[in-house]
Image: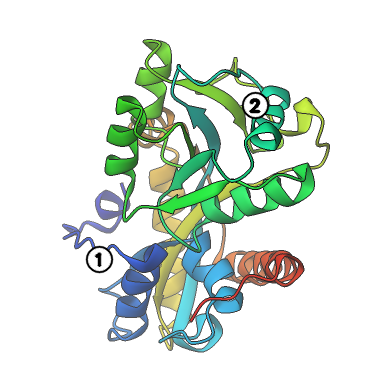
């Protein structure tokens, strides 16, 4: 998509781990030559700075925001065997079995983890968190019934499993229903007005990148995001594409950092 607009072949190197912090740190330490860019998400750009006592990078000092790329809702997904189909039933079950209902996420400090913590706080329940290193193992364990519940932001495997009846969606955490899961009600619809948590991701580059290069990269993504191939790719993963300017993305990151910093302080969560 962006490579086609720039006339360049893109080489993708996946640096997973620590909720995206490892990959984001690699971008922060790269040369600001315009040839090394990364896709970072809410976890490493807006949550980690308030969640971790020590981070190897500074979002404001070590990175150049380029553009938002897209949004995807988080979904509360369950194995079909659980004795509830909605949040009312989930809450009642959790209160009747305190600390016994487990849920998986893609890691401590991720947007799905924070969504779960925020939901527990306002619902007055306590669930047992099982952090995974990625989404594939969560899907396997959920399908096998090893864990009864998960908070997910990667809907690629969820969507077909829900359609085939192997999993069920209790709720989506975005303000409006997901186009990919139109029958799944939101958390807000089920008695918690104003609840709105989505995972977002965007393009970043090392600090001191030329503003002209940053604008060129943002424009390339904006053009690429509007192509039929890009739209279809986002539809397949249940996401909504988004493109903006470097300045707009920088403002967005600051606003999201303030929001999640307040949530983290409210919940009293802190990691080393």
Image point (22%, 56%), residue name: 7
Horizontal side of residue 226 vs 146, given as left or right: right
Quadrant location of residue 264? bottom right
Q: Nearer the viewer, residue 72 or 139?
A: 139
Q: Position of residue 128 (x, y in %)?
A: 53, 48
Q: Secondary structure at mark 2?
A: loop
Residue of label 1: 15
Image position of 179 with respect to 251: above or below: above
- Residue situated furthest top in the rendering: 164
Q: Is residue 243 visible?
A: no
Q: Position of residue 67 (x, y in %)?
A: 50, 61
Q: Which numbered dot is residue 177?
A: 2
Task: Count the numbered circles shown.
Answer: 2
Image position of 198 with respect to 26: above or below: above
Q: Position of residue 105 (x, y in %)?
A: 44, 48
Q: Are marks 2 and 1 in contact (CB under 8 Å)?
A: no
Image point (51%, 80%), residue name: 59
Specify which label sits upstream in the sequence, 2 or 1.
1
The Cα–Cα distance between marks 2 and 1, rounded to whole angstroms, is 31 Å
Task: Judge the density around disc 1: few (<14), some (14-19), many (≥20) Cα neighbours within 10 Å.
Answer: some
């Amino acid at each position: 998509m962006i490579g086609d607009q720039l006339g360049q072949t893109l080489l993708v190197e996946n640096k997973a781990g620590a909720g995206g912090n490892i990959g984001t740190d690699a971008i922060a330490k790269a040369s600001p030559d315009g040839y090394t860019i990364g896709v970072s998400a809410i976890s490493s750009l807006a949550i980690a700075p308030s969640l971790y006592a020590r981070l190897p990078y500074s979002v404001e000092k070590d990175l150049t925001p380029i553009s938002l790329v897209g949004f995807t809702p988080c979904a509360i997904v369950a194995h079909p065997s659980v004795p509830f189909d909605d949040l009312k039933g989930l809450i009642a079950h959790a209160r009747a079995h305190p600390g016994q209902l487990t849920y998986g996420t893609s890691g401590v400090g991720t947007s799905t983890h924070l969504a779960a913590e925020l939901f527990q706080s306002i619902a007055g329940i306590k669930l047992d968190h099982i952090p995974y290193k990625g989404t594939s193992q969560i899907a396997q364990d959920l399908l096998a019934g090893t864990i009864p519940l998960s908070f997910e932001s990667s809907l690629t495997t969820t969507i077909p499993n829900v359609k085939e009846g192997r999993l069920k969606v209790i709720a989506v955490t975005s303000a409006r229903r997901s186009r990919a899961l139109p029958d799944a009600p939101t958390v807000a619809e089920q008695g918690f007005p104003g609840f709105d948590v989505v995972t977002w991701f965007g393009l970043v580059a090392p600090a001191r990148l030329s503003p002209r290069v940053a604008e060129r990269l943002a424009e390339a993504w904006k053009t690429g995001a509007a192509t039929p191939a890009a739209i279809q790719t986002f539809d397949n993963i249940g996401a909504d594409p988004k493109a903006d300017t470097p300045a707009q993305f920088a403002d967005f990151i600051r606003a999201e950092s303030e929001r999640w910093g307040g949530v983290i302080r409210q919940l009293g969560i802190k990691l080393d």
